[in-house]
Image: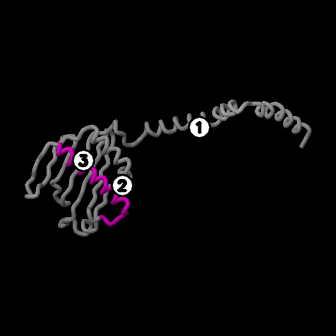
Amino acid sequence: MSYLDINFYTLYKSLFLSKFIEMTIKSKKIFLGLCIIVPFLMYCVYYYSNMIKNAPFRYADFESIEFKYGEPNHMVNEYNSKTRIYKYLDKKDSLITDTVKLTKNDLLYLHRKAMELGFWNLDTDMTGPEWQTDSTNSKVPRFYLEYNYKDKSKHVILDADFAGNPRMHDAAKSMIDEVNRMLATAQAR
């Protein structure tokens, strides 16, 4: 160490460390808060506000949900939240048309459930092996779910015999079950 280094160290030690040691516990906490915690909180607010603002699927842009199910070549059971028309086959194989209104709370719940289950990350085509080998005679139940937003839409086609990633199958099936349950609840009102 040179003489100049020793002088800077001595100066630093005498000015800063002596003042820091003389600080009370309360002033040390304030100093720590100002130097570390406040910049961290400011960064978190900046980072997450941009993340939320640029979210790909926001509820503010939400328009409608389309849900269809049945045999792949003729899915007669369908619901569209924009038109509020729900068509389904009853136990006697009669096509029944009903008007079912999902409330804003129902749609918000379904939107949040889609975020929770990772609906946006699911594959679009989750068809099973029977459909891929013989698409004209397939009798395996198929589900089609689509979320429509102002600029984008996301749809998933799921066959009951999908043999791909089980996590993706479970997430898609859970999402379809939630929509079906919400429709049944809204229809009972």
**Which residue does the numbered mark 1 point to in the structure image?**
40
> In which quadrant of the rendered image does the C terminus lie?
top left
> In which quadrant of the rendered image does the N terminus lie?
top right
Mark nearest the camera among 1 and 2 is: 1
- Which of the marked residues, 3 or 1, is nearer the chain's N terminus? 1
Question: Can you tell which mark lies on residue 151?
Answer: none
Mark nearest the camera among 3 and 2 is: 3
In the rendered image of this protein, does residue 57 appear above or below residue 118?
A: above
**Which residue does the numbered mark 3 point to in the structure image?**
182
In the rendered image of this protein, does residue 166 appear above or below residue 99?
A: below
- Which of the marked residues, 3 or 2, is nearer the chain's N terminus? 2
Rendered location of residue 171, percent (x, y): 34, 56
Quadrant in which residue 167 is drawn: bottom left
How far is mark 1 from mark 2, CA to CA?
34 Å
Quadrant in which residue 11 is drawn: top right
Question: Does the magenta segment cover residue 168?
Answer: yes
